[in-house]
Image (cartoon, helix red, strand yellow):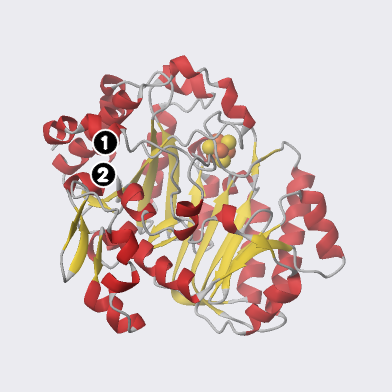
Amino acid sequence: MQNHAMHTLDLLLALDKPIPRYTSYPTAPEWGSIGPEEYRAALKKVTGPVSLYFHIPFCRTMCLFCGCSVVLNRKVETEERYVDYLIREMELVCENRKIPVCQLHFGGGTPTKLSCELLSKLMSEIRKQFDILPDAEIAIEIDPRTVHEDRGEKLHLLRELGFNRVSFGVQDTNEKVQEAVRRRQSYEVTKYTYDLARSLKFDAISLDLIYGLPYQTVETFSDTIAKIIDMRPDRLSLFSYAKIPWMKAHQKAIPDETLPSTEEKFRIYLLAREELLKAGYKAIGMDHFALPTDDMATKPLQRNFQGYTVLDVEDLLSFGITAIGYCQEGYYQNVKELDTYYSLLDRGVLPVFRGKVLTEDDRIRRWVIQRLMCDFKVDKGQFFSRYNIPFDSYFAEELTRIQPLLVKNDSFSLQATEQGSLFIRNVTSLFDYYLAQKEGHKSFSQAI
Ligand code: SF4
């Protein structure tokens, strides 16, 4: 695989242009102003079971590669106040209805930066406002450093609160890389957290890695991958460093000359992929790997703002600053500043400020994009059964632009080739109506 893929490197490097990750379609730059009344009307149609997302934006320090929505904070009062407002937001969304929930996710920021008391308070309020189904997936993103510093107390508590899935930020175990991105997290801290999570019998343990960071080479990253394989997590995400300094100014502190070249970055990805496949992991979607026994390897995939999931849920209700949710009508995003969030909730107003109500064309393309991102393939018969339109005639113009090296097209299906599956964002972007309208844009990270 590695030799074959490198053989076509010249062509593939030509594909390294800014492309969305397609956690939504239409993508966020296409959204416009949406008010609380529109969101309230959409909420009235929600019956569940739904997914819930809580954004906990606080971090103690800023990792230089970070692309998340983060508030640097060391004051517990700030976090207490934020949790109180999350509870107010839930009250406004629920309006005394107990909507059933099959999936709950705490993301950030660093959700485990909240104290044990605040985590307990928030979880108990969620259970009061919503009907959490007995087999719900309850997941949280964990910074291992926060687990290590209290000798595991928080991880024990999370299990007692009903969390059954955890994902740990690791990114890279190499000290020079960690120093360059200002995320100092020893391998011992990661291993301690992982072993404790295993002993507490979380259902699915996932680790996050990033390739393309400063000073990474094939050699350094192969050492990281060996250590990770040794731990044997159920799932792994292997994200490309998304360099977007025009949106995340702190990334400018990473000098360009310390970053691996595009070619080296691609080699690092291929090395990691090959090692993981050799170790028995199955490649899932664009950037995930899972053990063959894990749900992700055995069930149909879907894609949402947290990446890949096996639950096919129509509605995602999201809480907190910058949080993005969707209902069948479309996408809705909360305001980005804490003060605005608080003052809207003080007035009893849902803190939504923008989003996108989907057109029929958006829905059709969203389905095609989802299938490509999840299965690397679109079944034309399935497309016809859903929309009663022949795929080839609806996408006649797009099909004139497909590259045979990346896509195999016949009367039954459209499928990414082996090379195309490495560049699935490029293949997918062919069906993005909005992207086609604006060549030369710079809203997204590079494809590689
Ligand atoms: S990578 Fe995680 S811990 Fe680091 S700043 Fe971003 S959200 Fe915080």
Q: Quadrant of the C terminus?
A: top left
Residue 11 is situated, as x and y percent measured from the top left of the image, at: 24, 34
Name the residue at 30% across, 66% down: 396
Pick the residue in front: 205 or 188.
205
Q: Which residue is mark 2?
A: 422
Relative to residue 446, is residue 411 depicted above or below?
Answer: below
Pick the residue in front: 45 or 130.
45
Mark 1: C-beta under 8 Å from nearest atom of ligand 1:
no
Pick the residue in front: 60 or 444.
444
Q: Which residue is mark 1?
A: 12
To which quarter of the image does residue 345 belong?
bottom right
Residue 430 is situated, as x and y percent measured from the top left of the image, at: 36, 55
How far apart marks 2 and 1 lie (CA) works out to 9 Å
Verify CB contact (< 8 Å) between mark 2 and mark 1: yes
Q: Is 263 situated left or right of 45 in this image?
A: left
Discs 2/1, front: 1
Q: Give the SS element for disc 2.
A: helix
Relative to residue 239, is residue 95 depicted above or below?
Answer: below
Whether residue 61 appears in this view of the structure is no
Ligand 1: which quarter? top right
Name the residue at 76% across, 60% down: 85
Q: Is 427 situated left or right of 197 in this image?
A: left
